[in-house]
Image (cartoon, helix red, strand yellow):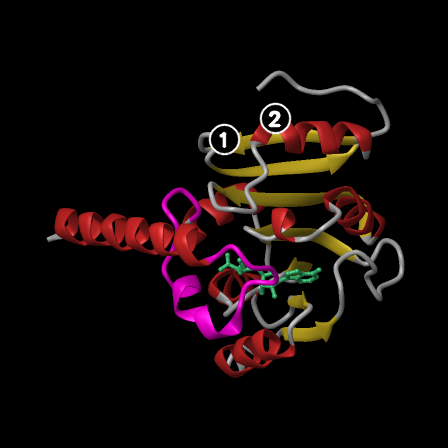
């Protein structure tokens, strides 16, 4: 039974991934195609995000580009009532959608904004994350810079990317990270579907993966 469930989930993910590849060439991702966002992509499940992001009860987190809230709900649940997830999206419809789904959690705060110019003071968040969003935004370096600016010292930054029309291969993320003085701490998954955790570093060096 369990095996059947896993096979179905993988098949659904592959179908969604293919549909995404086929239709998902416009940016920002169209709200009219939101059903695709509710199917976890292979390799980018919320369990895997949790492994890399390590949410702890009471933390304040920033999510860029929540879409319909697949990751938001999982993370907010783990942060508990003392925690908070600020979701930032360029489309009000996406924010409204997540707000409706997360109402019972009470710890999700939406902000309509472009990720290239975040309306938060420096050192606001314990962690920030984005899944299949970085490549969709015109200037990935500017986004990483802004996310780093609003992180508390020692804060963590998690980036998830998938092989779609806006995909950022892992090697390219490493180049952006190096330019922004971010240290890649860990990564799971192949370059076509990975989650990576980064931290601002004082030394301009990288760990061997
Ligand atoms: C492909 S969806 C990913 C949604 C969700 N993270 C997931 O994995 O299901 C990309 C999201 O990023 C948002 N987005 C695109 N460009 C943006 C920008 N410049 N600033 C903030 N959000 C943006 C889109 O509106 C959309 O909600």
Q: Badge 1, how many Cα within 10 Å: few under 14, some, many 20+?
A: some
Name the residue tied to disc 2: 171
Q: Residue 129's spot in the image, x, y percent?
A: 63, 51
Q: Residue at x 46, y 35 (%)?
A: 192
Question: Disc 2 on helix, strand or loop?
Answer: helix
Q: Residue at x 45, y 70 (%)?
A: 34
Q: Residue 102's spot in the image, x, y percent?
A: 52, 77
Return the residue nearer the eye: 50 or 68.
Answer: 68
Residue 127 visible in image: yes
- Is 141 left or right of 47, judged from the image as shown? right
Q: How many badges with numbers are in the image?
A: 2
Q: For the residues labelled 1 and 2, say whether their Cβ atoms are less than 8 Å apart.
A: yes
Residue 59 visible in image: no
Q: Is residue 113 above or below residue 203?
A: below
In which quadrant of the rendered view does residue 208 lie? top right
Return the residue nearer the eye: 9 or 106.
Answer: 9
Q: Badge 2, how many Cα within 10 Å: few under 14, some, many 20+?
A: few
Q: Residue 45's spot in the image, x, y percent?
A: 41, 50
Question: Disc 1 on helix, strand or loop?
Answer: loop
Q: Is residue 155 above or below residue 93?
A: above
> What segment is highlighted magenta in the picture?
24-44
Mark 1 vs mark 2, CA separation in Å: 8 Å
Of helix, strand and loop, which mostly describes the magenta segment? loop
Q: Residue 119's spot in the image, x, y percent?
A: 84, 66
Residue 191: mark:
1
Q: Residue at x 64, y 60 (%)?
A: 63
User: Per the image, is 146 magenta?
Assistant: no
Return the residue nearer the eye: 57 or 171.
Answer: 171
Earlier sequence position, callout 1 versus callout 2: 2
């Amino acid at each position: 039974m369990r095996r059947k469930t896993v096979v179905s989930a993988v098949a659904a993910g592959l179908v969604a991934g293919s549909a995404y590849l086929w239709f998902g060439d416009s940016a920002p991702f169209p709200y009219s195609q939101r059903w695709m966002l509710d199917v976890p992509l292979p390799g980018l499940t919320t369990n895997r995000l949790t492994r890399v992001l390590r949410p702890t009860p009471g933390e304040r987190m920033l999510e860029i580009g929540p879409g319909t809230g697949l990751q938001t709900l999982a993370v907010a649940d783990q942060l508990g009532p003392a925690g908070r997830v600020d979701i930032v999206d360029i489309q009000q419809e996406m924010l409204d959608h997540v707000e409706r789904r997360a109402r019972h959690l009470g710890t999700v705060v939406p902000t309509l904004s472009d990720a290239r110019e975040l309306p938060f003071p420096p050192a606001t968040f314990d962690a920030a994350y984005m899944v299949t969003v970085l490549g969709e935004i015109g200037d990935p370096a500017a986004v990483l810079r802004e996310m780093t600016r609003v992180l508390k010292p020692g804060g963590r930054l998690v980036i998830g990317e998938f092989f779609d029309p806006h995909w950022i291969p892992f090697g390219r993320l490493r180049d952006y990270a190096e330019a922004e003085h971010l240290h890649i701490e860990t990564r799971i998954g192949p370059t076509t579907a990975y989650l990576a955790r980064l931290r601002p570093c004082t030394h301009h060096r990288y760990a061997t993966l």
